[in-house]
Image (tube, helix red, strand yellow):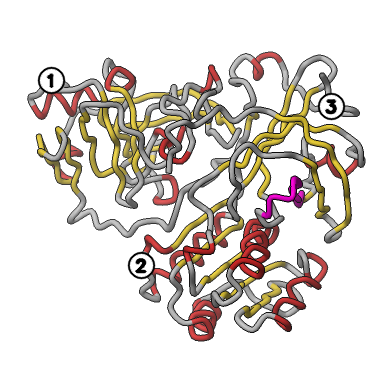
């Protein structure tokens, strides 16, 4: 049933085709996070791949930046309803991290952990095969602190809360363990095209 | 934390029962709606509008009312220039309308009476709305909890709930209001203001900051500078 008196401003078809259900296009880049920007020193920054509690490999900022680079361009979608088109990112693919660590994924699930104590879960299948990276650059420049720099996860085909800001590591987990928002009613997977915003969507 | 028997958050038909002006750009909208789960102060709801051709627009709005279980929620919606949804509410919505709504949503920017205080609230512009919910809840459920609201707006015409906040500051022994007008000879939030708030309140057990990103980012950084533990600082920013 329609809302009395609402006509709205339906975007042009070319835009509509790229907008998942319930989303609208923004030209801005809104900043959303649970707390203050963490204070990160590149001299002590580290990124660690873990299996449960066991570290598999840790990279310093210098070592991380020596890894092979990858680029991705496309649209991103935030659960708070905005979508942003044609974003450009550069960083280190999940595949490159595994290759440099000399390991195969030991489990099917990951928990991304941030310097701000944020966490979020992502299936390995959603970052492997070129689908996810740890990004250090946005639009040709180092990612600003407000947007998760020096390094953030990028899993662009899922709602953007999965692309954890200020990421300090990825932890392989035996089971699919919910992270910060997933423990507070948000969807375990978060596919924008199926509008998986909340538990049960 | 997650309810193991978490049910889907269903869309409900909410009836608009009252509209009243709050400032020149903000109106209050009260909806009759029964939630199927407990609400917490600081949460928001999603609204969904549907055009005759099926086109839909969704937006999130913070709840201004206390979670008192009376079967209604109050939202305060600022009419934004070109706002597709806020413009509809400003110009078209009328008492008796049915609006699709789901909620309550959000488990991070919430305060419960048992969370205690001192409670430092900092709001920029309409970012005061979820803080108002916390203050209203606190006044009834935990009036002994010390609280201070640092509220920054452009000028006196934009102060949301001005009379209510002034009355609370006058009548509630443990509540202090620091109103900052950034125009009319005032200035933007700075270290001196944040330090004054901390002096008056004492070290906060919880801080809740809501507003535009520059306001929230500035206050969060100033609280870190003052030595407040980041885990005590909760933020909610517009632009989503």
Look at the picture and state if B4 lies above or below B112.
above
Residue B103, disc: none
- Decide: is B221 above or below A162: below
Q: Determine whether, in the image, residue B113 is placed left or right of residue A45.
A: right
Kindly report the distance in space between the C-alpha atoms of the residues bearing marks 1 and 2: 38 Å
Q: Is residue A106 rendered to the left or right of residue A156?
A: left
**Quadrant (top left, top right, bottom left, bottom right) of the N terminus of chain A:** top right
Q: Which residue is mark 2?
A: B229
Residue visible at 73% across and 72% down? B165
Q: Residue B163 or B113: which is nearer the viewer?
A: B113
Q: Earlier in the sequence, mark 3 or mark 1?
A: 3
Point 33% across, 20% down: residue: A126
Residue A99 in view: yes
Q: In the image, are marks 1 and 2 on the same chain?
A: no
Can you identify the residue that label 3 sits on?
A3
Q: Is residue B19 above or below residue B34?
A: below
Q: Secondary structure at mark 2?
A: loop
Task: Name the residue beneath numbered marker 1.
Answer: A104
Q: CA distance from mark 3 to mark 1?
A: 52 Å
Q: Nearer the viewer, mark 3 or mark 1?
A: 3
Residue at 84% of width from left, 26% of height from top? A3
Residue B124 appears in the picture as rendered: no
Element marked by disc 1: loop
């Amino acid at each position: 049933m329609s809302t009395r008196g609402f006509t709205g401003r339906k975007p042009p078809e070319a835009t509509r085709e790229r907008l998942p259900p319930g989303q609208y296009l923004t030209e801005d880049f809104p900043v959303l996070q649970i707390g203050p920007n963490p204070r990160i020193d590149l001299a002590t920054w580290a990124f660690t791949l873990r299996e449960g509690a066991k570290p598999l490999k840790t990279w310093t900022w210098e070592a991380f930046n020596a890894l092979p680079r990858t680029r991705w361009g496309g649209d991103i979608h935030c659960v708070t309803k905005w979508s942003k088109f044609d974003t450009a990112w550069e960083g280190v693919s999940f595949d490159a991290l595994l290759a440099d660590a000399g390991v195969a994924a030991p489990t099917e699930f990951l928990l991304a952990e941030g310097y701000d104590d944020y966490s979020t879960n992502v299936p390995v299948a959603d970052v492997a095969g070129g689908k996810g990276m740890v990004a250090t650059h946005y639009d040709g420049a180092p990612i600003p602190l407000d947007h998760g720099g020096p390094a953030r996860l990028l899993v662009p085909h899922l709602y953007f809360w999965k692309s954890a800001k200020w990421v300090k590591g990825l932890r392989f987990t035996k089971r699919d363990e919910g992270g910060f928002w997933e423990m507070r009613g948000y969807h375990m997977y978060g596919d924008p095209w199926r509008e998986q915003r909340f538990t049960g969507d | 934390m997650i309810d193991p028997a978490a049910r889907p958050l269903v869309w409900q038909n909410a009836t608009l029962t009252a509209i009243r002006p709050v400032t020149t750009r903000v109106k209050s909208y009260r909806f009759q709606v029964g939630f199927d789960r407990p609400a917490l102060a600081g949460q928001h709801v999603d609204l969904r509008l549907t055009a005759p051709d099926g086109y839909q627009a969704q937006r999130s709005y913070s709840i201004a009312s206390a979670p008192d279980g009376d079967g209604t929620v109050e939202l305060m919606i600022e009419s934004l220039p070109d706002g597709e949804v806020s413009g509809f509410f400003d110009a078209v919505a009328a008492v008796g309308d049915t609006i699709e709504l789901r909620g309550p949503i959000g488990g991070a920017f919430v305060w419960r009476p048992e969370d205690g205080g001192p409670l430092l609230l900092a709001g920029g512009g309409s970012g005061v709305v979820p803080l108002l919910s916390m203050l209203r809840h606190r006044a009834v459920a935990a009036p002994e909890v010390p609280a201070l609201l640092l509220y920054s707006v452009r000028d006196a015409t934009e102060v949301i709930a001005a009379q209510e906040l002034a009355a609370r500051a006058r009548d509630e022994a443990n509540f202090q209001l620091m109103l900052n007008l950034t125009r009319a000879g005032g200035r933007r939030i700075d270290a001196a203001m944040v330090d004054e708030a901390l002096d008056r309140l004492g070290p906060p057990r919880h801080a809740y900051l809501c507003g535009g990103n520059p306001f929230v980012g500035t206050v969060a950084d100033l609280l870190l500078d003052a030595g407040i533990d980041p885990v005590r600082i909760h933020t909610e920013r517009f632009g989503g």
